[in-house]
Amino acid sequence: MAVRIEVGFKEGVRDVAGEALKRRILEDLGIEVDSVRIVNGYTIDKELSPAQVEAVRGEIFTDPIIQESSTAPLAAAFDWIVEVGYWPGVTDNTGRTSLEAIEDLLKIKFEAGEEVYASRQYLLKGKVKREEVEAIARGMLANEIIERWEMKSYSQWDKETGMGTYIPKVKLNHQPKVEEVDLNVSDEELARMGREGVLGKGEKERRGPLALNLEEMKTIRDYFNRPEVIEEREKTGLGKNPTDVELESIAQTQSEHCKHKIFNGLLEYREEGQEEVIDSLFKTYIKRATDEIRKNLGKEDWCVSVFGDNSGVVKL
């Protein structure tokens, strides 16, 4: 049975994040509220004993000097409450870190399907209308692409059940399957596959756009047609043709997000009769500038590692 732990500031302790949010609501949305207080929630979807829950509540989630926590709802003295959490399937980093902390503390393991889900409650006090609270939730509190939100007025609030226990698990009714895709088709059909997606055998629905042009699709096709590739695939039980999963993986790694094809490509720049070809905006204007600065710094260079991964390391 899932258990929920809520954590908030003790009476008299300033909620600095809540105060900042109150100012932003007024400045950005023109809506005035008297106060905003924040309560963090952690829903543990795993069977734990009362002693284990108490240990987790006191030793992981609560700073006893400034915070109070409980397995019962903490919300009080508000006019509206908005709870925000992730949609099913969205990566919950706070929940994942909490799970690892619980495993370390209790010396237990979470099994497949057992998770910890983080959420946050915003307690709004003031004479605000329902439509104004909705505007605050959508415009300030939640990113509806990845987050769900729910709101209640104080009169709708149940101090025993609070906002209830919501488990954002992904539930799918379909049976996943992998299918081979024949790329030895006409250029027109190959271009359509790259533009619109791949059709499975006997299916009318496409898998989804690969966002690959004809040249890229031909390169992929030619690779899978290599004799040595076919031979190696046969050794591992794979067919000659690529699977739809393989094509999706290739398309993902070749996407603009991962590959930066435009950012690293050749760009023709024209302005008032001036024309030049820029070989990679990244290398020309970002990496080169950093390299020149590091060279000028000499022994005082405080960069430890840059452009080697998705992050850099500097001396501080």
Image (spheres, rainbow, N blue to C red):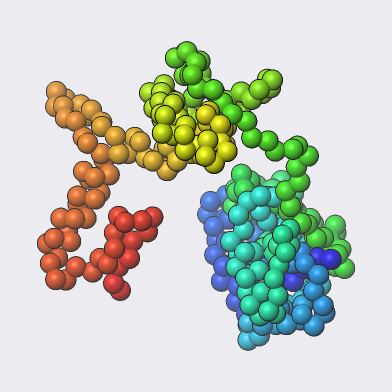
Vertical position of residue 178 compared to residue 205: above or below:
below
Q: For the point 16% across and 71% down, which residue is it? A: 300
Q: For the point 33% across and 65% down, which residue is it? A: 313
Quarter residue 238 falls in: top right
Give the x, y percent position of residue 102: 67, 74
Q: For the point 57% across and 67% down, which residue is it? A: 17
Q: Is residue 284 visible?
A: yes
Q: Is residue 125 visible?
A: no
Give the x, y percent position of residue 212: 45, 28
Vertical position of residue 293 compared to residue 103: above or below:
above
Would you say 274 lies left or right of 56 here? left
Q: For the point 70% across and 38% down, which residue is it? A: 176
Which residue ends up furthest to the bottom in the rendered image? 65
315 or 84, nearer to the observer:
315
Give the x, y percent position of residue 61: 66, 76
Quadrant where the N terminus lies? bottom right
Vertical position of residue 42 compared to residue 128: above or below:
below
Would you say 159 lies left or right of 20 here? right
Vertical position of residue 311 compared to residue 176: above or below:
below
Would you say 41 lies left or right of 290 here? right
143 or 77, nearer to the observer:
143
305 or 300, nearer to the observer:
305
Give the x, y percent position of residue 106: 70, 79
Quadrant where the C terminus lies? bottom left
